[in-house]
Image (cartoon, rainbow, N blue to C red):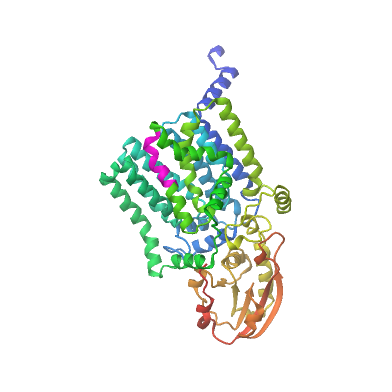
């Protein structure tokens, strides 16, 4: 063979460079976002709610007191080889990466060019609130990508007349309902938006109603479970409202929190997404999305929802706004995006586990960027509620295991371990497997339905209870220690562990008094 016919190194380099240039810019953004998430996914330990979801997923059912079944099943599946925070967060990383690509595709669907797609992808990737939702694997993790996917398929049906798209919208809505019921805050306003705009023509499509049927069929197992169990999810939220547990605040406070949570320099993007469809004819078909954002904001506020309940709507509006803002002068656009990235970098340690707890505490003190609590449970968080609730669980389990092993074998066989809240109980269940701890008991949420598990109360190791209160019902109460670590939530620090012996009434008889749906 003639060596001159072989490709040279420079030719191969040029070919590779050409191929890289053909990769959509939003894919490179998604790659960076994914690598950042992967790099820090295992730095802190498992979050309180993640522990709870793992335990729920190990008790497969069609529903649970405070959530549908999909996320618990997924969380439990990631831990089949043992407890591993990094593996647990892989679905969240996938959601963050997928959201970037989906938002960019959404912008292209609306007629945006590659610049618009890039802007939408960057915004979806760097908005602090969206980063925070995909830092852990919880029911809120998949809301941004699910809500955006539903809006994408609905928009595709409206813009392109694609009747199959409404079927896919139904699939997304049904699956989202099996992950978290919150998508109702988006489905209802978007439905109103379709009804009030020219998009209403799709109401005549049989495919639309078939898609709605698909959504219902996918969602109905969890809804049936809720109905059979007396709608505990609604009871739980009624209790939240009665106690004022969510700090929604005034409309002005609520909107200010939205502005800062999504990166205030990205506000022009989603505001343009709301306004432009009514002022610029090429985006007229997207008016129902604008109505959807307004309606979702009103619904969340009226329901006294937490700030993050509304965060999943913004990627769709980023896509709409990017079509407009891609048209501004390149130098202005570049400076604006660069400034937005800088703002998100400054906030990044607050939403990603980049810094160790002590360093994060110092950063929060120096920057004054700690987010105000959105619920009563977040008050007093030394770091943020998310990160403070990832600390101390293994230490708690080790202390309880030590107390449990200190008991005589005969007494140990009938000893129940009772925790004050589901976070403590779940930590004992997840980490206690290695130390042979029995399943934990708790009166909160799903744990209440699992009952006393046959324990009579003759000996109880109680975690974070009130010893004085239990002295009235036990023959003896012995405080054997305290648990807690620096930077944990206040109600998980310096809390008692005590042993109740000789409960005067059988534990199953008083179990109903321990019920707490909250």
Instruction: Name which residue lies at 50% across and 63% down.
Output: 56
Q: Is residue 474 magenta?
A: no
Identify the residue shown where x is 64% and y is 45%.
347
Judged by its main secondary structure, the magenta piece is helix
Q: What is the x, y in percent for residue 201?
A: 28, 41
Residue 108 visible to the viewer? yes
Read off the magenta span.
Answer: 283-293
Q: Is residue 151 left or right of residue 495?
A: left
In the rendered image of this protein, does residue 229 appear above or below residue 95? below
Residue drawn at (53%, 31%), measured in percent from left and top? 25
Residue positioned 54% across, 81% down in the render: 507
Q: Is residue 290 shown in magenta?
A: yes
Name the spot of residue 28 as percent of width and height, x first: 55, 34
Near-viewer residue (314 or 273):
273
Q: How far across and how far down the image is residue 417, in percent? A: 60, 74
Of residues 505 and 265, the one nearer the viewer is: 265
As displayed, is residue 379 above or below residue 276?
A: below
């Amino acid at each position: 063979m003639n060596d001159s016919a072989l490709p040279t190194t420079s030719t191969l380099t040029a070919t590779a460079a050409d191929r890289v240039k053909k990769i959509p810019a939003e894919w490179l953004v998604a790659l960076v976002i994914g690598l950042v998430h992967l790099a820090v996914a295992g730095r802190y330990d498992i979050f309180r709610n993640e522990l709870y979801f793992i335990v729920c997923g190990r008790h497969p059912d069609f529903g649970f007191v405070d959530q549908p079944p999909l996320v618990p099943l997924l969380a439990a599946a990631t831990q089949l080889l043992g407890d591993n925070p990094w593996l647990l967060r892989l679905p969240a990383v996938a959601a963050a990466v997928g959201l970037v690509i989906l938002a960019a595709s959404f912008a292209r669907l609306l007629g945006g060019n590659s610049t618009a797609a890039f802007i939408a992808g960057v915004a979806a990737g760097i908005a602090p609130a969206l980063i925070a939702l995909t830092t852990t694997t919880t029911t809120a993790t998949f809301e941004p990508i699910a809500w955006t996917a539903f809006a994408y398929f609905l928009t595709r049906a409206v813009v392109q007349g694609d009747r199959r798209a409404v079927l896919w919208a139904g699939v997304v809505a049904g699956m989202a309902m099996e992950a978290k019921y919150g998508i109702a805050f988006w489905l209802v306003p978007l439905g109103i938006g379709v009804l009030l705009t020219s998009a209403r023509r799709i109401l005549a499509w049989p495919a639309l109603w078939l898609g709605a049927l698909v959504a219902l069929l996918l969602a109905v197992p969890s809804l049936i479970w809720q109905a059979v169990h007396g709608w505990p999810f609604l009871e739980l939220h009624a209790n939240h409202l009665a106690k004022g547990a969510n700090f929604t605040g005034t409309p002005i406070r609520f909107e200010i929190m939205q502005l800062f949570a999504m990166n205030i320099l990205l506000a022009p993007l989603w505001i343009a997404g709301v306004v432009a469809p009514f002022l610029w004819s090429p985006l007229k078909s997207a008016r129902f999305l604008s109505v959807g954002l307004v309606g979702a904001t009103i619904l969340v506020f009226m329901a006294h929802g937490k700030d993050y309940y509304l965060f999943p709507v913004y990627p769709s509006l980023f896509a709409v706004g990017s079509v407009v803002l891609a048209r501004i002068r390149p130098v202005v656009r570049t400076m604006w995006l660069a400034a937005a990235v800088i703002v998100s970098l400054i906030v990044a340690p607050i939403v990603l586990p980049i810094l160790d707890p002590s360093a994060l505490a110092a950063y929060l003190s120096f920057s004054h960027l700690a987010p105000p609590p959105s619920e009563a449970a977040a008050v007093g968080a030394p770091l943020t509620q998310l990160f403070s609730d990832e600390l101390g669980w293994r230490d708690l389990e080790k202390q309880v295991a030590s107390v449990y092993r200190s008991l005589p074998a005969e007494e140990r066989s009938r000893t129940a371990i009772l925790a004050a809240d589901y976070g403590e109980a779940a930590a004992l269940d997840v980490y206690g497997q290695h130390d042979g701890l029995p399943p934990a008991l708790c009166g909160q949420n799903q744990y209440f339905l699992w009952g006393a598990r046959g324990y009579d109360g003759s000996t109880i190791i109680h975690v974070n209870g009130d010893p004085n209160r239990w002295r009235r019902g036990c023959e003896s109460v012995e405080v054997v220690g305290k648990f807690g670590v620096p930077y944990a939530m206040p109600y998980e620090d310096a809390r008692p562990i005590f042993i109740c012996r000789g409960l005067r009434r059988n534990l199953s008889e008083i179990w109903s008094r321990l019920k707490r749906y909250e």
